Image (spheres, coloured by chain):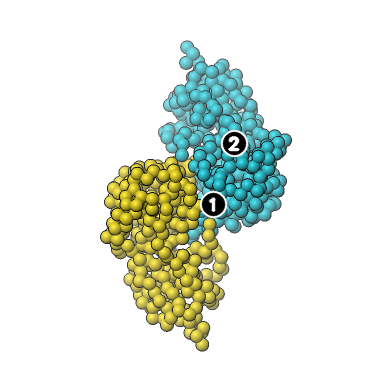
Chain colours: A cyan, B yellow
Amino acid sequence: MIEGHGDDTYKYHHIKCDFSSNICVHSSHQALMDHLAAHPEMVSHYPEPEAWSLERMIAKHHDIEPKQVIVTSGATEAIYLIAQTFGRQPVIPTPTFSEYEDACRLFPCSAEKTDTNSGNGESNQMLWLCNPNNPTGEVYDQLYINRKMAEYGLVVLDLSYENYTDAFVMSPRWGCRIPYSIQIHSMTKTYGVPGLRLGYITAHESLTRQIRKHLRPWSVSSLAIEAGKFLLQHDELICKPDLQEARRLAVNLAQIPGIEVTPSQTNFMLCRMAHHTAAELKDYLAYNHQMLIRDASNFRGLTPQHFRIASQTPPENDALVDAINLFITSRNE
Amino acid sequence: MIEGHGDDTYKYHHIKCDFSSNICVHSSHQALMDHLAAHPEMVSHYPEPEAWSLERMIAKHHDIEPKQVIVTSGATEAIYLIAQTFGRQPVIPTPTFSEYEDACRLFPCSAEKTDTNSGNGESNQMLWLCNPNNPTGEVYDQLYINRKMAEYGLVVLDLSYENYTDAFVMSPRWGCRIPYSIQIHSMTKTYGVPGLRLGYITAHESLTRQIRKHLRPWSVSSLAIEAGKFLLQHDELICKPDLQEARRLAVNLAQIPGIEVTPSQTNFMLCRMAHHTAAELKDYLAYNHQMLIRDASNFRGLTPQHFRIASQTPPENDALVDAINLFITSRNE
């Protein structure tokens, strides 16, 4: 496990505004917690060995078959399960979420076990695409994905941020028809509940059948299963980032001398400073302004100058732009 | 993942008394759930990538070092992590908990990666011991364990039921001094909270260092971490099975014609019928008496005649003995 993911608020004290996590979070999860507290008996019983009841609900929600769904303890478990099941040679674009590489490194020898019949194109290569991509916020369009599906034996699409963009990403119903594509979904991101650990895989059943062999029993807690059912019935709890505000922030950041912003189609964006390091800026903002940003230098392919910002409210974003301006001005004096 | 674990109450309706799960459960977890509900902000933030804060508390509790502790999503994750890290040839006595074998089967090729320096005896063999043992309730004494430690390269001791017996099992402080023994602990069992998924490993740091490399980030939810801290501070919530009542039940079961009971030092016991199958008895009890027992025939080394019973209250145990008597009598007519 590497260190240095976002949302490391637990390491800093007195942070007032967190721009480091690209998760859009609701102001309160009290209704969810009250629902869980009303069912204390959940704690006393083992969860289903596999979260079948929640898988059935998710299948209905997407109009697909329950056997095309596997509920996991966060999208992270999905990533590790896929790496473990399909030991093909991974192809991972940069920059992207670091867990694909970490997971594939842990399971280098599972290749021998893999059924390669389901492949298309060069069947021993597995492409990992994060769509929208973390940390850039870029969205790959359907044409691009179709082309990649023709090129690679297996295409893993991490759709964790699918609700964080206006762009069309992919329908699970369409994805489940393709025997060489796996989709990862994150209830963590969709509902802003990273503390719960809840995600799921959708895929053609020839692929889910292979993945299921590697599931360990009870990997999803009763609390997470019950929370998932509650969330699926409360569409009003789906996180909807203010994308217009994110675009305004991007424009304002790009106007700071020496800051470059990669065009994003989501609420978070990748920035690069010409003359200073992200580590310096992060410390400055944390200790002087109680703001937390994501030092993105540990993404493969990026530099010590890269950082990631997730858009917050207009006043918070304005305060961030002012603070970065102050940092740049003070360092340039 | 195999099917057929205990506590499959979710498959049966109208079960009034569950003898199938060997977990001793408190009557209410309302205090724990109210505590969690009072902290809804936990849901909005990622947990620590590894549950360091809880590891520190557990270390203090056992008077060992934090680096000698790894918190896991239930003892099951601990079992799979150990199998993944140490790919030695597993030696698994029968009958015992089936997950050791399932986990070792999933990671057959990790042997090459393993540092075998820490071994003792024949270093390419890894012995798995469940102590007290599931499903028999047998306790291996210190003399036996010492002998096994001299024989095997690595001894994994699953102490999940350590609080379910009066017999001395093992102190983590002693265990952590030995560089070829790993101990698994289950907060699930100690506090009767199987719905939470919470366990931990204690071991010499030369072993925990290797295991840590295989941890995936955020495998333990914020809710489980917070619950673990709450439980550690509430000793009154530790499950203490009524072992005297369990012995009374064992005596009464053994008096039923055609029933054999393996001597147990815990609250659960393995039984064998001379003339009928556990599947028949299980269905009879579920549909006629709303009681659930554990068909133990899928434990390697056991027969279709084996079942496991976990002792409940005296009236419930008496009702079970009466019901089994009725079953035997009606079938013998």
Residue sitting at 44 percent across and 26 percent down?
A283
Q: Secondary structure at mark 1?
A: loop
Q: Which residue is mark 2?
A: A91
Q: Nearer the viewer, residue B288 or B213?
A: B213
Sequence order check: which comes first, mark 2 or mark 1? 2
| Residue B222 in view (yes/no) | no
Residue sitting at 54 percent across and 74 percent down?
B283
Rendered location of residue B332, percent (x, y): 50, 85
User: Cα distance, mark 2 to mark 1?
Assistant: 22 Å
Dot 1, how many residues are within 10 Å of its Cα: few (below 14), some (14-19), or many (20+)? some
Q: Which residue is mark 1?
A: A214
The disc labelled 2 sits on which kind of residue? Val
Q: Secondary structure at mark 2?
A: strand
Rendered location of residue A103, percent (x, y): 52, 41
Tag 1 subunit: A
Tag 2 subunit: A
Q: So how many labels did they put on this image?
A: 2
| Residue A3 in view (yes/no) | yes
Q: Nearer the viewer, residue A61 or A31?
A: A61
Report the residue that reaches farthest toward the right: A143
Dot 2, how many residues are within 10 Å of its Cα: few (below 14), some (14-19), or many (20+)? some
Q: Nearer the viewer, residue B69 or B31?
A: B69
Residue sitting at 51 percent across and 87 percent down?
B333
Residue sitting at 35 percent across and 75 percent down?
B248
